Image (spheres, coloured by chain):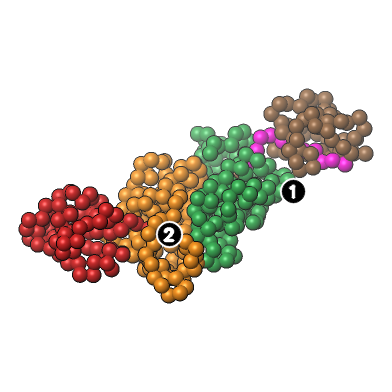
Chain colours: A orange, B green, C brown, D red
Amino acid sequence: MAVQLESLPFDPAAELARFESSLPVGSVGASASFVGTMRNHNEGDEVTAMMLEHYPGMTEKQLEEVIADAAQRWDIIDALIVHRTGNITPGDPIVLTAVCSAHRAAAFDACRFLMEALKSRATFWKKETLANGQQRWVENNTPG
Amino acid sequence: MAVQLESLPFDPAAELARFESSLPVGSVGASASFVGTMRNHNEGDEVTAMMLEHYPGMTEKQLEEVIADAAQRWDIIDALIVHRTGNITPGDPIVLTAVCSAHRAAAFDACRFLMEALKSRATFWKKETLANGQQRWVENNTPG
Amino acid sequence: MAIKVKFFASLREQISEGLEQVDATGIQTISDVWERATQTQLMPERVLCSVNLEHREPHEAVSDGDEVAFFPPVTGG
Amino acid sequence: MAIKVKFFASLREQISEGLEQVDATGIQTISDVWERATQTQLMPERVLCSVNLEHREPHEAVSDGDEVAFFPPVTGG
């Protein structure tokens, strides 16, 4: 069970490969993963950049709690959350959640739970830069 | 939208990376993926190898139909199914499903749909080799 | 005047004497194909079938030139 | 005898004169911390708060040495 905050761009495929290679061969039957990527549009406006602020110390703790909750609710073998911070451009991965389990229902359910829980609970805030140079704080998170 | 049958081991991380790199930057906000891997146990028995038979021509067509159904039901940007055939050993990936979309609900829902639909509809059959050398056809698919 | 016949997985092994094609004369349904290809065995309920790569029910019609397949429930993924 | 105060995101920008720490004397709740740190502004309803990295409600108690943070609704992921 691991949480990683990354202040520089990360490669979800490489993180996933590393995560999976650390698992015992033969016990894992299912791996579900999700990658959230920065889009170049939000709420009808063209977005050229984004700054992701967090609360160092609290954010990591919250992500660890989210994983602990998932491990309590589902029979999972391992889970991973990687989340960007800092300055992001369109196309950059923002977040990766991954869950391995023996059977697929637990992996699917827990992976989705990690995303929904971190979006509602973890202290991250997005500030967008629009094409016209204007900056704005994102006020509401997208519904799941 | 792509379907690949692989008669030799494939690398899900590499397939995913290739899939994602083919997409237009900035429009994708969400990518959900699932990897089914061969376990070394099934129905209480140790399993040492598996043979995955399919119906060439029909299987590919069914997987394409499954993707077309997903594209009809959800607003998705692209989807991928990779499925092994032939001789498999524990730890080998059996299947990869991946879906990209603007928002996460469609990616999660469609990715899971691909898995459930292919498990119930696509003409694949598993024959297991147990630790004692006995071989048996898998009779029932695992519930979702 | 022939119908192509395929068996898959456990069926392929069980019906080791199954024909790869049958004469279409007098054949109307998938069940007829089964009986001719397996030489008298009645088609078991659990057997699934297809005609020209589409799932079909045993009572459905087949025509000269069709490819008919018989197989157990699928277990992929 | 001090309480550490943090503001995040839009709040950090809006409350540019906010104090990074306040004297704990006479402070009982999170709301008290807000009023002293922002110098009289009443704490808006939409503001979320934490004490020592745990989410808390504005009426809850704080003690000398605590770290209190104020922030808008989260928008990560």
Q: Residue at x 53, y 61 (%)?
A: B28
Q: Is residue C63 above or below residue D31?
A: above
Question: Does residue D15 appear left or right of residue B62 in this picture?
Answer: left
In the image: residue A8, left or right of residue D13: right
In the image, residue A143 sits, relative to residue C13, either above or below, namely below
Residue at image point 16% right, 62% down: D40
Instruction: Kindly tell me whether residue B25 is visible in this rendering.
Output: yes
Instruction: Place residue D30 in its image quadrant.
Output: bottom left
Q: With respect to residue B4, does A129 lie above or below? A: below
Is C68 colored magenta in this rendering? yes
Residue on which the image places disc 1: B57
Point out the residue furthest to the bottom here.
A133
Q: Nearer the viewer, mark 1 or mark 2?
A: 2
In the displayed structure, does residue A51 sit left or right of residue C70?
A: left
* Quadrant of the drawing holding the N terminus of chain C: top right
Residue A95, label in figure: 2
Quadrant hosting residue D35:
bottom left
Three-letter amino acid code at the position of disc 1: Gly
Q: Chain of mark 2?
A: A
**Viewer-closest of C26 and D38:** D38
Chain hosting mark 1? B
Q: Position of residue B27 (x, y in %)?
A: 54, 63
Q: Quadrant of residue D32?
A: bottom left
Q: Secondary structure at mark 2?
A: strand
Residue D55 at x, y percent in the picture? 25, 51
Segment colored magenta: C65-76
Residue at image point 38% right, 40% down: A73
Residue at the location (39% across, 54% down)? A119
Find residue D76 and report its horizontal and vertical position in percent.
38, 58
User: Was residue B51 drawn as part of the magenta stretch in this picture?
Assistant: no
Which amino acid type is marked by label 2? Val
- Viewer-closest of B79 and C48: B79
